[in-house]
């Protein structure tokens, strides 16, 4: 208010009693009061050189000096009242709110970062397991190729013995040996097939019915990190209860799971449950 008042009064002499403005040219015009300043403010303005009794206009430098002095007096008044916004160690209300908002934002980012790191560790372990499976498969295929070579030569020898009939007992013995090797090869391939089938994810249909906007299936299958999001494929007749569904890719095994519904934890209504080491109750999902 003081700065605006001083700016308007730069070219005028103000009578605080009547509230009229007298131009420095000597002409008097009776106007509505335009300056709401108090006598003390006007006295300060006169002492600061806002208006000159000699009728001389202030230069730009003098005007800036007047504004600087007004600012200094304002800061002095704020300091006396304990409201100085520039006083160190005393942030204003806005600063405190910004600080609290920054702290909350940092907490959320730290939680998301920890979740991302945990999921990254899980992915790295899965990649290591997949690489090991590939190495085992390559070694097994190499053994199978060598066995096929040996069996092929044994087949040729047995066929020659049967064709020429030099020694029937020798031909029978070779046939028996060939059958045994083929049976052993078949059993080995079947065992490897069973082992590798446990490393192939299976699509497991999962559904949750209720009132919600977001549903996820969480569990120890990925270290309780991200889980799988279920989508609302349909809305029931009442228009409120929704059915959330998903085909979740999981390896064969036994898992502890829970539904995360709008940020809260829910158990599956028709699945078996058990307590973990910390006493938390979880649903049990078995993938064959």
Image: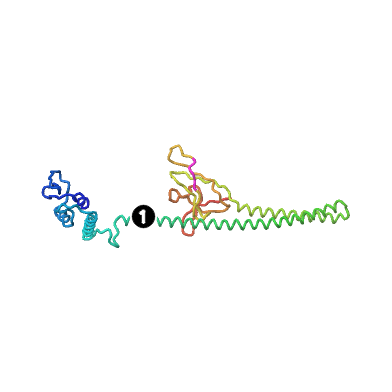
Per the picture, the main secondary structure of the magenta-coloured stretch is: strand
Q: Is residue 256 magenta?
A: no
Please identify the residue farthest to the left as the structure is shown. Answer: 17
Front residue of 160 and 39: 39
In the visual, does 128 lie left or right of 38? right
Q: How is the image coloured?
A: rainbow
Q: Which residues are magenta?
A: 229-233
In the visual, does 14 lie left or right of 224? left
Where is residue 8 drawn, in percent x and y? Answer: 20, 49
Q: Secondary structure at mark 1?
A: helix
In the visual, does 241 lie left or right of 90? right
Q: Residue at x 86, y 51 (%)?
A: 163
Where is residue 51 drawn, in percent x and y? Answer: 17, 53
Count of numbered circles in the view: 1
Q: Residue at x 44, y 45 (%)?
A: 213
Where is residue 205 drawn, in percent x and y? Answer: 54, 45
Residue 239, image quadrant: top left
The residue beneath circle 1 is 101
Please identify the residue farthest to the bottom as the structure is shown. Answer: 89
Where is residue 209 drawn, in percent x and y? Answer: 47, 44
Q: Mark 1 packing: few (<14 Cα in 10 Å), some, or many (20+)?
A: few
Q: Residue at x 60, y 51 (%)?
A: 200
Please identify the residue farthest to the top as the structure is shown. Answer: 237
């Amino acid at each position: 208010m003081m700065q605006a008042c001083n700016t308007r009064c730069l070219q005028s002499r103000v009578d605080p009693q009547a509230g009229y403005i007298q131009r420095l040219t000597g002409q008097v015009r009776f106007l509505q009061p335009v300056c709401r300043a108090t006598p003390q403010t006007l006295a300060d303005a006169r002492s600061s050189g806002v208006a000159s009794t000699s009728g001389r206009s202030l230069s730009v430098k003098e005007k800036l000096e007047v504004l600087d002095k007004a600012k200094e007096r304002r800061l002095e008044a704020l300091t006396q009242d304990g409201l100085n916004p520039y006083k160190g160690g005393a942030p204003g209300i806005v600063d405190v709110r910004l600080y609290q908002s920054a702290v909350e934002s940092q907490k959320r980012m730290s939680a998301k970062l920890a979740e991302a790191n945990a999921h990254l560790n899980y992915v790295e372990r899965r990649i290591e397991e997949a690489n090991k499976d590939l190495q085992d498969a390559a070694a097994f295929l190499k053994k199978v190729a060598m066995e096929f070579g040996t069996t092929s030569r044994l087949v040729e020898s047995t066929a020659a013995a049967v064709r020429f009939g030099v020694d029937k007992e020798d031909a029978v013995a070779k046939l028996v040996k060939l059958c045994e090797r083929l049976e052993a090869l078949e059993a080995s391939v079947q065992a490897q097939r069973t082992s590798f089938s446990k490393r192939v994810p299976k699509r497991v249909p999962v559904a949750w019915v209720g009132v919600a906007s977001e549903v996820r299936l969480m569990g120890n299958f990925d270290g309780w990190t991200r889980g799988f999001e279920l989508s609302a494929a349909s809305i029931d007749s009442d228009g409120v209860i929704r059915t959330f569904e998903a085909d979740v890719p999981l390896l064969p095994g036994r898992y502890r799971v829970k539904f995360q519904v709008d940020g809260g934890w829910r158990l599956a209504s028709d699945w078996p449950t058990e307590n973990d080491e910390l006493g938390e109750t979880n649903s049990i999902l078995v993938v064959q």
